[in-house]
Amino acid sequence: MAGKTIFDISAPGKKAFSLPACDVPEVPVDSLIPAKFLRADPPGLPEVSEPELVRHYTRLSRMNYSVDSNFYPLGSCTMKYNPKLNEDVASLPGFNHVHPLQPEATTQGALKLMHGLEGLLREIGGMARVSLQPAAGAQGEFAGMLMIRAYHESTGRSPRKVIIPDSAHGTNPASAHLAGFEVVEVKSGPDGLVDIEQLKNLADTDTAGFMLTVPNTLGLFEKDILAISEVIHGVGGLMYMDGANLNALVGLVRPGDMGFDVVHFNLHKTFSTPHGGGGPGAGAVGVSAALEPFLPAPTVEESAGRYYLDYNRPDSIGRVQAFNGNFGVLVRAYAYIRTMGPAGLREVSENAIINANYLLARLKKDYQPAHDRHCMHEVVFSGRRQKEQGVHTKDIAKRLLDFGFYAPTVYFPLVVDEAIMIEPTETESKETLDSFIDAMERIAREVVEEPEAVRTAPHHTHTARLDETEAARHPVIRWKRQAD
């Protein structure tokens, strides 16, 4: 049955259902739907039995890769296991069946949860207020940059420049540009951190803000954050923290205490929602007191034990998302934070950091570290040594699939030649990491002893190596039945 479509197992007359004869008069279809909208011929759907139907889709589901089945070492994506308890909470009827257009009197529980989640995120981030509206980290960035622009305009200023390091997430410059700013790049120094002297030369009164990913995309903590903050604030700019890597900081340090005026939280990464496939997501954005008037409207407020949506915010940047964001993600995040507690959240970061440094220590003899010193929650290697053997990072990633592991992030960050970026997260055991290390070590040996086996991988997956250029230029996005 492997490789067959459901049409291949179809046969005339088979049915996946069995119902008793109808015991009420049947109404002719053409009396309900005008004839011009009715098909002249049946739609040509497959005809299969119920067991065939169930087995076909069960087989397809087993071809999928998920964090419930194995390890996702994707750098900068925090693809960690998500506790099923949080799924159960999000499935409660009062949360799962709530409608955003219901009257506030009937959604007090949902509003109370959102109000409570904002309070938790305020404490975690050291911020004055948090908006839960943005549906993704990038949308949180965009909302943050709009608030920075609104803040400057409220003071009678209109600085146009946003400074961003060359190691930033790609969405940072995009968000700043969409908000109407000019993007100026600051280079990393030899240590992989922001070059402070170059930053001082770039920062001036036309600087609206500075966007910094912490830890940065090299997996390193920017030790000069306070100095950076002093430089930017000194010229009247604001500090923005990309919180996509918060999995290394939660419970350890707070963005607000480091001088950041805006930070977004990827609730779908750090705070327990399945991540990938284009969603779901939530990019809650926190701000300092100076930017609180510009938060997206409405905000969730409380008065005398009653929760309500406040639309009366004249300085707000307006809505950035329909209704109040992805509510199911908010429920999961709330359940996760309450379950973990302060000590548990701190342990999340500590274990994520330990796991990444364990990988660094074990793999650096075979793969060149981008920076051979302690990292945070993720570690970046370079495939330069393998490139000298005619094997590229992409080949290594493809070969890893043969060992049952998802490929790590490759060719990012762009400042590292043949980059291999790995984030083990806190949820993976030493046994899982050891198995991953064994596979990476074997691939390193193959690069030397039988490089063709790596260059032509994968060999044991359902689909062999694709022609990526052809797929990009001539994508096949639907199946067409061949003529009989």
Image (cartoon, rainbow, N blue to C red):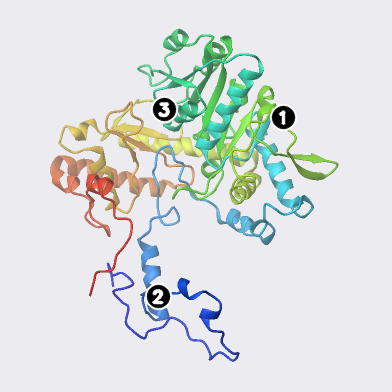
Tell me the residue at 27%/34% (across/down).
Answer: 367
User: Seen in the image, is 142 located left or right of residue 218?
Assistant: right
In space, the residues marked 2 and 3 are separated at their CA atoms by 52 Å
Say what secondary structure mark 3 lies in: loop
Farthest residue to the right: give it.
304
Q: Earlier in the sequence, mark 2 or mark 3?
A: 2
Choose mark 3 or mark 1, whichever is in front: 1
Q: Amino acid at mark 1?
A: Pro
Identify the residue under disc 2: 53
Are circles 3 and 1 on residues that touch, CB within 8 Å?
A: no
Quarter of the image that includes the C terminus: bottom left
Residue 374 has which mark?
A: 3
Residue 54 x %, y %: 42, 74
In space, the residues marked 2 and 1 are separated at their CA atoms by 56 Å
Residue 205 x %, y %: 54, 9
Choose mark 2 or mark 1, whichever is in front: 1
Nearer to the camera, 211 or 217:
211
Tell me the residue at 47%/9% (across/down).
Answer: 200
Quarter of the image that includes the N terminus: bottom left
Residue 25 has which mark?
A: none
Are circles 2 and 3 on residues that touch, CB within 8 Å?
A: no
Tell me the residue at 40%/69% (across/down).
Answer: 58
Residue 357 x %, y %: 41, 34
Q: Residues within 10 Å of mark 2 (few under 14, many from 20)?
A: some
Q: Residues within 10 Å of mark 1 (few under 14, many from 20)?
A: few
- Vertical arrangement, residue 91 with respect to residue 234, above or below: below
